[in-house]
Image (cartoon, grey):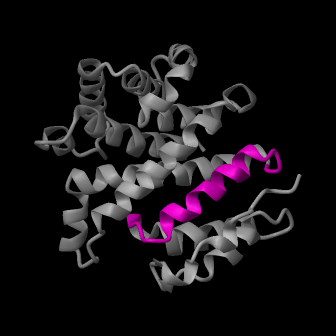
Amino acid sequence: MPIDLSGLDDIPWADLGHAHGSAEDIPELLRALSDPFGDWDSTLDVLFGDDLLHQGSCYSATAPALPFLSRMIVSGALPARQRLDLFVWLLVAADRWADSLLGDADHAVAQGHLPIPATWTEDVHLTVGEQLPELVSRWETEPPAVRFLLACLAGLYPHHARRIGDQISLMAQEFHGTRPGAYLLLAEALVYARDDQALAVAADIIAWETNHDPGWLEVADVTTAVKAGHVLAEGALRALSDAE
């Protein structure tokens, strides 16, 4: 099926930027990504790994590009493997805001990277959230790996995702006793705004997941949902990568 990219050329890409300068090449990359005969992996890596989310950063062109990923997901034109790839990048993008709030951005500056304007990371987070109602409507049609990422993405936006809370609960029970099951349990607690439970589950995960920073849960003036959500996003991507 053709993918609707209407409005792509209405965005002033030349006035926006990414990791390597002007974002005027973003429309070409998005069109290449929608081409069923194109080089999917290479295009996706350039678009996000090199340009829009380079080394965990966000840019002025990042948020405007994200709705086109959602259109690709819901179009029915992409196989499950490619939809999974797009959900991965949506989750990475959504979590950049928590990164900036929890101090990872300060660490990046200390390593010599340029600081990320807070408005960019917040815009990216909000933009992903705006796509969620349409994305969660695909729950019944997606395979388990995609549902896992969709559940974790839903945990970051409970006000948009409560309607799949029961399905997330069932999936958490199905994977009880596994690493994915722990993250699904955390997603469930966040979707239902059970802050105490979410904090307890996140603390338990950090106790056995050595790649997580215990300091994330101790940052002052940041909500429990943001702290636990960062544990969820970081861990879910790692668990998926290990499973593959």
| Residue projecting furthest to the front | 10
Question: Residue 69 colored magenta?
Answer: yes
**Picture coordinates of residue 17, whole percent (x, y):** 47, 79
Is 202 on the left or on the right of 120, as rendered? Answer: left
Question: Residue 232 colored magenta?
Answer: no
Q: Is residue 42 at all visible to an observer of this figure? A: no
Magenta stretch, residue numbers: 56-78
- Of 15 and 180, nearer the camera is 15
Query: In the rendered view, would you say 120 is above or below 214?
Result: below
Residue at screen point 64% across, 50% down: 70
Query: In the rendered view, would you say 198 is above or below 157?
Result: above
Name the dominant secondary structure of the magenta segment: helix
Label total for image: 0
Is 48 on the left or on the right of 200, as rendered? Answer: right
Residue at screen point 63% across, 38% down: 135
- Place residue 186 in its image quadrant: top left
**Picture coordinates of residue 56, whole percent (x, y):** 39, 63
| Residue projecting furthest to the left | 220
**Picture coordinates of residue 214, whole percent (x, y):** 19, 41
Query: In the rendered view, would you say 71 is above or below 154?
Result: below
Residue at screen point 55% across, 84% down: 14
Residue at screen point 52% across, 44% down: 130
Quadrant containing the C terminus in the rendered view: top right
- Place residue 185 in its image quadrant: top left
- Of 64 and 50, nearer the camera is 64
- Place residue 138 in its image quadrant: top right
Q: Is residue 230 at all visible to an observer of this figure? A: yes
